[in-house]
Image (cartoon, grey):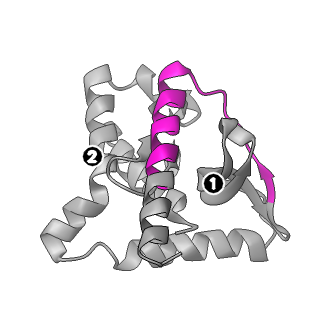
């Protein structure tokens, strides 16, 4: 899902806004990696409320709770409603398409082919990109710390394993 990062990031922003007691439009948050409960990486260290780090407003425990809620957001909806494919996936896809059509140059996490970025090759994985009239204008390499990079490497390996499994059954 090309826009999985946009969808997961919007869920992260929602959970952050609930924890902060504010409007979600005043929060910035990003999720990278795979689009799955164990492969997505909510980047709480980069999350902000009105431009200030969320750690100025939330305890480490509360931030950890938001991260965990983000990671199981889709599964939670599926448990409640039988699916998570309602409004949010379509809205995330529209957000990505609108950024391209209107040359908005927004930074949005999307699944893209990595050719050395984040130390990965020959793999499509969710990372922040600038989207404009030409599609992906630029892949943004964030300065991930050691823990974040280890999580990204684990996510990349999980994506590779899924790809290998799909090749085994002839789906790729």
The residue that appears at 34% across and 39% down in the rendered structure is 67
Give left or right: position of 98 versus 164: right
Q: Secondary structure at mark 1?
A: strand
State the residue position of label 1: 123
The residue that appears at 53% across and 20% down in the rendered structure is 146
Looking at the picture, how far across and down is residue 158, in whole percent?
A: 43, 49
Which residues make up the magenta segment?
137-159
Report the predominant secondary structure element of the magenta stretch. helix
What is the tally of numbered marks visible in this picture?
2
State the residue position of label 2: 69
The residue that appears at 30% across and 62% down in the rendered structure is 74
Query: Closer to the observer: label 2 or label 1?
Result: 1
Crowdedness of circle 1 by 10 Å Cα count: few (<14), some, many (20+)? some
Q: Is residue 39 visible?
A: yes
Taking 40 as reference, is 106 above or below it? Answer: below
Q: Tell me how far mark 2 sits from mark 1, CA to CA.
A: 27 Å
Q: Is residue 7 visible?
A: no
Which quadrant holds residue 79? Answer: bottom left
Extreme front residue here? 168
Badge 2 or badge 1: first in the primary sequence: 2
């Amino acid at each position: 899902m090309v826009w999985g990062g946009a969808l997961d990031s919007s869920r992260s922003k929602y959970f952050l806004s609930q924890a902060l007691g504010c409007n979600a439009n005043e929060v910035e948050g990003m999720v990278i990696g795979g689009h799955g409960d164990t492969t997505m990486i909510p980047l709480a260290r980069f999350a902000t409320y009105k431009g200030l780090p969320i750690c100025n407003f939330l305890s480490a425990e509360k931030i950890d709770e938001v991260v965990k809620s983000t990671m199981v957001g889709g599964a939670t909806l599926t448990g409640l409603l039988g699916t998570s494919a309602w409004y949010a996936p379509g809205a995330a896809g529209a957000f990505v398409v609108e950024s391209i059509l209107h040359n908005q140059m927004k930074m949005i996490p999307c699944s893209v082919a990595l050719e050395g970025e984040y130390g990965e090759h020959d793999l499509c994985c969710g990372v922040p990109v600038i989207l404009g009239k030409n599609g992906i204008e630029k892949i943004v390499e964030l300065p991930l710390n050691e823990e974040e990079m280890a999580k990204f490497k684990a996510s990349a390996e999980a994506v590779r394993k899924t790809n290998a499994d799909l090749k085994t059954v002839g789906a790729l």
